[in-house]
Image (cartoon, rainbow, N blue to C red):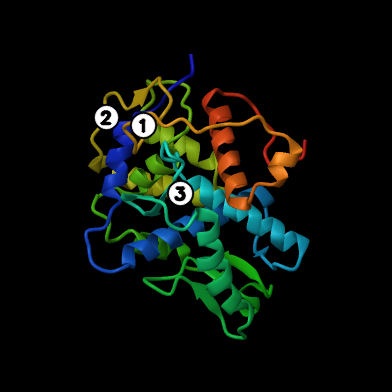
Amino acid sequence: MDGFHLKDAVVEASFGRLSSRNKVGKTHLERTSALMYFLAFDAVVRQKNNHPLDFNPRSAEGKNNRDAMTLEYARLVQLQNTPDGQIRHIANLGRVDTGGIPPDKRISSNFFTVPLKKASQSAKRQTYPNRPAPLLKMGLSSTGLGWGIDYDDDWKINLPKMMSEMKGGSPFTDLAIVVFRGARYETNREYLVKALTDKIPSKYTEDLARYWAKKIDTESPLIKQIDDPYQTSLPRPFINEPNVMKSETANPISLRSLDKEALIRRIVYLERLLKEHDIKFLKDHDTR
């Protein structure tokens, strides 16, 4: 028995409710990016058990933190490739994109190279994003580190503002469903809300997990109990046709020839398979 997974239809319904009511402009694209960067940052803080974090590209620690956040971001937004090998990813919540800028290059060019670099060169307090309200603060005057990133003081107040234009009335629950779309659940008899809130601390900091669980709890009266939200087959949301990623026997020479995007794609794919089959593996933040 492979365990239980969220039904593809449940994930897709939640994903649709996270789309924007406003069809004009790039606001939702910007908010999706900011939200995913914030979640990726928090996941790395949980791994390191420390913040602020240094992202100086000229230091070993900074490079390590950049790689860790890039990988966490890719895990959030990257989907199975198309049968012909094109990347599929989430740039806008509620919409699946094919092709375009790969996730690792997007966070590098849109986040590390623009707002973070600007903050590293500024003597003034810098925050991100500028609108509708910040979730992170950056730079020396904000974090004590030239290339530092930390939580904005008001992130708990500002996070709901990032989700204010989403179609559904339960954005925190729907976001949890999408984030943990590939998770394995031990039983199919547990109330979905509880199953989700139990998953969050396994990935994110205690502070964010408590906050997120409270938000889901306030939304629970609005959520109709889904009698059967689980399936035993491996999850394959957002795609209707078979899409098996091609694999090759790995060797050091072939792995060294891969670019960062290909390596991230391979890591995400292999970790998902290990989790789906409940195979324990050494994570990058384990010391054992």
Q: Please, which residue is most extreme toward the front here?
A: 84
Residue 275 locus on image (x, y percent): 55, 29
Residue 207 can be seen, yes or no:
no
- Image-based side of 95 in relation to 266, left or right: left
Relative vertical location of residue 143 with respect to residue 21 in this rendering, above or below = below
Residue 30 locus on image (x, y percent): 39, 65
- Asked if the residue at tag 2 contacts the one at tag 1, i.e. Cβ–Cβ closer than 8 Å, the answer is yes
Question: Which of these two is toward me, 230 or 50?
Answer: 230
Q: Amino acid at mark 1?
A: Leu
Please identify, in this view, whether the residue under mark 2 or under mark 3 is nearer the observer.
Answer: 3
Which numbered disc flags the more N-terminal residue, 1 or 2?
Answer: 1
The C terminus lies in which quarter of the figure?
A: top right
| CA distance for labels 1 and 3 | 22 Å
Q: Amino acid at mark 3?
A: Val
Residue 178 can be seen, yes or no:
yes
Q: Dot 1 lies on which element?
A: helix
